[in-house]
Amino acid sequence: MSTTSPRSKKKPKLKLVLFDLDGTLLDSSTGIFSAIQYAFTSHNLTIDFEASTLRQHAGRGVEFLLQKINNKLNKDQLLSLKHAAFSHYQTHAVSITHPFQGVKEIIETLKSHDISWGIVTSKTRELTESVLAKVPYYDQARIVVCADDLNYKKPHPMPLIYAVKTLGISPQYCAYVGDTKSDMLAAKHAHCYRIFAEYGYEACVLGGSDYDFKISNLEQLRQWIIYMSA
């Protein structure tokens, strides 16, 4: 198991961990697909999709999923469906969104080692805030960066660069945990540790050069945090 970045043989002490939200901290796929189902039904559009098949795309946003399900939607239909899905998600998703097993323990471990943490997501602020309370100790997050906070979103590194600069922490002391290739690309170009959560939605096969450390569950991340804090 590789626990240090290939960038350096010396292990810098970890000071900040940033997390993706959907597919990394929260399993929000049920809420996402419920909102999409409602959007199509409320527009009297017949759809047939398997949520289990589309789960790997759950973190790519509602617009992507709508077009994945029906690639014949025109611009007006897409806009109207998005509005309906967002409205439904904001109202109902919190009741069917849950943290992945081990999130609470991760945050407790970070606190006990005096390591700051935050969230950098491609979800809009409005939708993020509708489910943020499902993240254990969410009020202890030092920063939450959403898709509409800046002019760029992942895979562009700017959201991560913005987070570390705002907190005054050098990226070499920061790790970013995410479940997609876009997450890993953003972390790479922001010069942060790249932690690939293969338990998440995308379930893509990445090569060893695409990440610094790979986890199949959050207990592995907790142990890595302890190691990097020694």
Image (cartoon, rainbow, N blue to C red):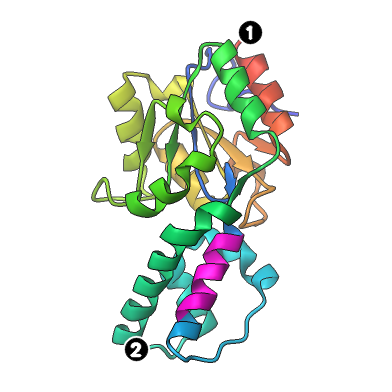
Residues rendered magenta in the picture: 30-39
Q: Which residue is mark 1?
A: 230
Where, quadrant-wise, is the N terminus in this rendering?
Answer: top right
Circle 1: residue type:
Ala
Q: Which residue is mark 2?
A: 74
Q: Residue most toward the top?
A: 230
The answer to which of marks 2 and 1 sits earlier in the sequence is 2
Q: Kindly identify the residue that appears in the image at 45 percent across and 22 percent down.
A: 172
**Does residue 99 show up magenta in the picture?**
no
Q: Position of residue 93 (x, y in %)?
A: 51, 58
Q: Is residue 65 left or right of residue 106?
A: left
Residue 24 visible, this orientation: no
Residue 81 visible, this orientation: yes
Asked if the residues shown at circle 2 and circle 1 are in contact, with their CB atoms under 8 angstroms apart, the answer is no
Q: CA distance from mark 2 to mark 1?
A: 55 Å
Q: Position of residue 46 (x, y in %)?
A: 54, 91
